[in-house]
Amino acid sequence: MSPMTALVQTVSRTALRTTLNTTSFLAPRLAGRAAFAISLRPAGRSRLRPGESELLADARIGQLTVNGKSVVTHQWGDGSRPVLLVHGWESRASRLGAFVTSLREQGYSPVAFDAPAHGASSGRDTSIVEYREIIRQLYAEHGRFEAVIAHSFGVLATFFALRDGVEARRVVGIGGVAEFDWIIDAFRTVLGLRARIARDMRGHVERVMLPGEPDVWRRFNATHRPEEIGVPVLLFHDEHDDRVPLGQSRALVRAYGEGARLVVTRGLGHRRILGDPEVVAAAVDFVRQERQHTASEPRIEPGVRIEPNVPDEPNVPDEPNAPDEKVVRDAAPRPGSAVL
């Protein structure tokens, strides 16, 4: 067991904060490296929920290797019209089961994986670079994806992979992270770390994750060089998401302009949105649409708020009913569903 592993397992968050902040005064690079190592480790593994075992039992199980870690993959259908499903942080492939079922009913072949340190895969840590490598290997096996449906951190990793040769006809992002900086800042805020540690974490990322490559930091952002993606994007985000703020999806809309649409839900949070029947139906309907240069309006029941594309301006309000939003009021609000 490495000293870093022992540290993570034995000290409390308060002690960890004190240790890292103190170290940052004495050895800033060491503190940044330690903080970065901790940030790559999920707090725990999500266990299978009722019904998910049956879903996985119906899949063809495969295996990839990334950085010496065994990655479990899942494939359904006959292999034609593949759709890639990418789970988020501290999640697993089975959480996207509602999409698997709906896609199969429409003749698609869903493909999913458990990232290292997640689900049934091995390892204690993972990173956006490992997510990208997994997606690249699956692309090499299956060819161009009809679509990628991604959640949370998986959205960030998806765009990173799409700018690196992976091809997909459409992208659906749910409760997605758009900016790598937000992850670093959120990690620092949760632990109560000094701003200096965040700067040293960034330096470590640039030296270790993509050494010698230009423009490292911005390349991790899903908003970076949107012209290199060139596919329609449909986004779903709950206005009261307690894990990833709605502003992250709004940043994607600003970056991708007419190529993206954002549907804002109410009462679904960060996790339940994955199983909402209306979100699933709208996402799969979007996947089925013929190829277009812009993201079509999703066919969702009246009452869902579809936000218009807005210029890339600072301080775009996150209030539910900002003046520039298009809100359809034909249906009564139904908390706990995709309908506002």
Image (tube, rainbow, N blue to C red):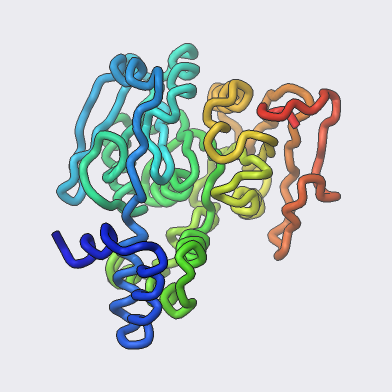
Q: Is residue 289 above or below residue 140?
A: above
Q: Is residue 255 above or below residue 158?
A: below
Q: Which residue lies at the image location 40% right of the left edge and 39% below the top edge?
A: 91
In front: 284, or 228?
Answer: 284
State how many labels appear. 0
Q: Inspect this view and state whether residue 293 appears.
A: no
Q: Residue furthest bottom?
A: 26
Q: Is residue 145 above or below residue 79?
A: below
In front: 7, or 223?
Answer: 7
On the image, the x and y values in percent for residue 215 come to 42, 69
Q: Is residue 125 above or below residue 16?
A: above
Image quadrant holding the C terminus, namely top right
On the image, the x and y values in percent for residue 254 come to 66, 53
The part of the image, by quadrant, that contains residue 207 is bottom left
Q: Which residue lies at the image location 32% right of the left edge and 21% below the top edge?
A: 56
On the image, the x and y values in percent for residue 82 come to 39, 25
In front: 44, or 114?
Answer: 44
Left or right relative to 53: residue 255: right
Q: Which residue lies at the image location 75% right of the left edge and 56% below the top edge?
A: 317
Image quadrant holding the N terminus, namely bottom left
Left or right relative to 273: residue 59: left
Q: Which residue lies at the image location 63% right of the left edge and 23% below the top edge?
A: 278
On the image, the x and y values in percent for residue 81 come to 40, 22
Q: Inspect this view and state whether residue 43 appears.
A: yes
